[in-house]
Image (cartoon, rainbow, N blue to C red):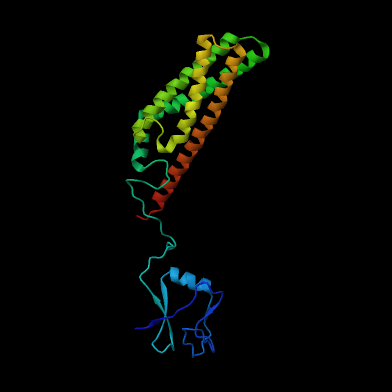
Amino acid sequence: MPNVIPFNVGDSFIGFFAPRCNRSGWNCTVNCPILFTSNQIDTALVLGVGFTSDSKGNRLNMTRQDHVSPVEPVGTKPQVNMGQGIKGALYTPEERRRRDESVWTLIQGVLAPLQFVVFLVSLGLVVRTLMTGEGAFAADTSIVLKTLILYTIMITGSIWEKVVFGKWLFAHAFFWEDVFSMLVLALHTTYLVMLFGGIGSFEARMGVALAGYAAYVINAGQFLLKLRAARLEAASIEADAQAVPA
């Protein structure tokens, strides 16, 4: 059986069978021009290459051991469990199928831009009222309408999450979007309480409404970024599918 050559991985420079090498534990009596650095030794060990000598220490052998290389061969792709999907993906294949087949996806796609249009109109009315003192009723009416649409989209969105992810709220793919939506909902609800409860001044009520609108814009941005990520993910999956040879 060949003997394993001892060496220190931390050495800055390691020579095998160099002329007149007499390090402890090495039998280096034959001149050889091959020198190895510690980095090369580390790399070889990771790749499963063993360094051995014969019983007399007169020859260096490099042997391939049973070792799985951590480096994927060029051109190979990781295998994906189609039941679970790619780790870190927004949707598993099954969730993506339910999303595409659900009518609630279409409903969300209609309500989201509708809410944004109402928001723009209402914001203009609120700013006009605060600047001129006119149109208070129109401003309040627009905020109530915006709030009602918000409630509707929250309810339908919760149903959509249940259908697609199996959870009414806080599904893994939209957890933080749902968390921030709670803040948006709380601010809009506070406005309604102030309006119908006669609490606070008109300016204070409008201030709460504007805070709710600011939170809504941030929340809408969250969902737009997530929508973009979903589209990029779908494009990547389609490209991978087309790249698979028949």
Whether residue 114 is visible, yes or no, is no
The residue lying toward the viewer, choosing from 22 and 198, is 22
Q: Nearer the viewer, residue 112 or 201?
A: 201
Instruction: Report the side of 137 relative to 67 (left or right).
Output: right
Where is 30 relative to 134, above or below? below
Coordinates of residue 242 in the picture (x, y in percent): 40, 50
Q: Position of residue 50 (x, y in %)?
A: 41, 75
Image x and y of residue 47, in percent: 43, 69
Viewport quadrant of the N terminus: bottom left
Query: Number of numbered discs present?
Result: 0
- Image x and y of residue 169, in percent: 40, 31
Q: Residue furthest front?
A: 24
| Left or right of residue 111, residue 123 in this image | right
Q: Quadrant of the C terminus?
A: bottom left
Tell me if residue 192 comes above or below residue 109 in the rendering.
above
> With respect to residue 174, does 236 lie above or below?
below
The answer to whether 118 appears left or right of 151 in the picture is right
The single residue placed furthest to the left in the displayed view is 83
Residue 184 drawn above or below residue 68 = above
Outermost residue on the right side: it is 132
Q: Residue at x 35, y 70 (%)?
A: 66
- On the question of residue 20 being in view, the answer is yes
